[in-house]
């Protein structure tokens, strides 16, 4: 079994402050990590739940993939991050199983992680991010 944890559930939102405030009020959640990822055009707020995260994600500019997603589909679950010990091995295994990579090779993600995205087509309609800590 290559998956070791659900690393995060990523939720695309228009207003990051409003979403954080909602999670704080509704659940008593606190933001453990916040980061602007320029290469992806996103700002993330990570709320820790046991050893996983809820990742609230907003766009930092109009050309961001998250901005396009929000414009097309509105707010909601954007992708699921699966934690793995070795991102390259997991990516190779997914491709061997018929999935289509978005990232041909692992690359830097937020929190100092190494990540690779895999296309929803070929993965039963779910955008999957492999996350190696
Ligand atoms: Co993610």
Image (cartoon, helix red, strand yellow):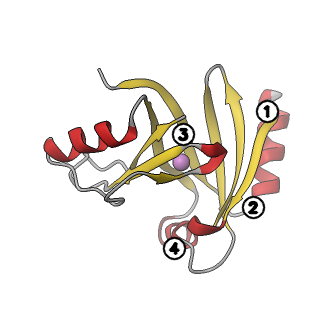
Q: Please tell me which residue is depicted at 57% across the width and 65% down the height of the picture.
A: 40
Can you give x and y, in whole percent of width and height, for residue 106 in the image? 41, 51
Tell me which numbered mark, 2 or 3, is placed earlier along the sequence.
Answer: 3
Circles 3, 1 touching at the beta carbon (< 8 Å): no
The residue under label 3 is 9
Q: Please tell me which residue is depicted at 77% across the width and 38% down the height of the picture.
A: 23
Dot 2: element = loop
Q: Nearer the viewer, mark 3 or mark 1?
A: 3
Tell me the quadrant of the picture where the C terminus can be found. Answer: top right
Can you give x and y, in whole percent of width and height, for residue 87 in the image? 39, 40
| Residue at mark 1 to residue at mark 4: CA–CA distance | 28 Å
Tell me the quadrant of the picture where the N terminus can be found. Answer: top left
The residue under label 4 is 68
Q: Nearer the viewer, mark 1 or mark 2?
A: 2
Tell me which numbered mark, 3 or 1, is placed earlier along the sequence.
Answer: 3
Give the vertical position of 84 relative to 18 (above or below): above
Task: Tell me, for residue 15, which label it has, or none.
Answer: 2
């Amino acid at each position: 079994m290559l998956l070791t944890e659900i690393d995060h559930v990523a939720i695309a939102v228009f207003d990051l402050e409003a979403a954080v405030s909602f999670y704080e009020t509704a659940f008593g959640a606190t933001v453990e990590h916040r980061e602007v990822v320029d290469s992806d055009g996103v700002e993330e707020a990570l709320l820790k739940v046991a050893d996983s995260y809820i990742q609230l994600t907003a766009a930092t500019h109009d050309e961001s993939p998250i901005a396009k997603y929000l414009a097309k589909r509105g707010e909601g679950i954007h992708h699921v991050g699966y934690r793995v010990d070795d991102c390259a091995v997991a990516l190779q295994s997914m491709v061997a199983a018929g999935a289509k990579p978005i990232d041909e090779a692992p690359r830097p993600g937020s929190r100092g992680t190494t990540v690779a995205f895999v296309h929803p087509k070929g993965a039963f309609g779910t955008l999957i991010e492999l996350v190696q800590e």
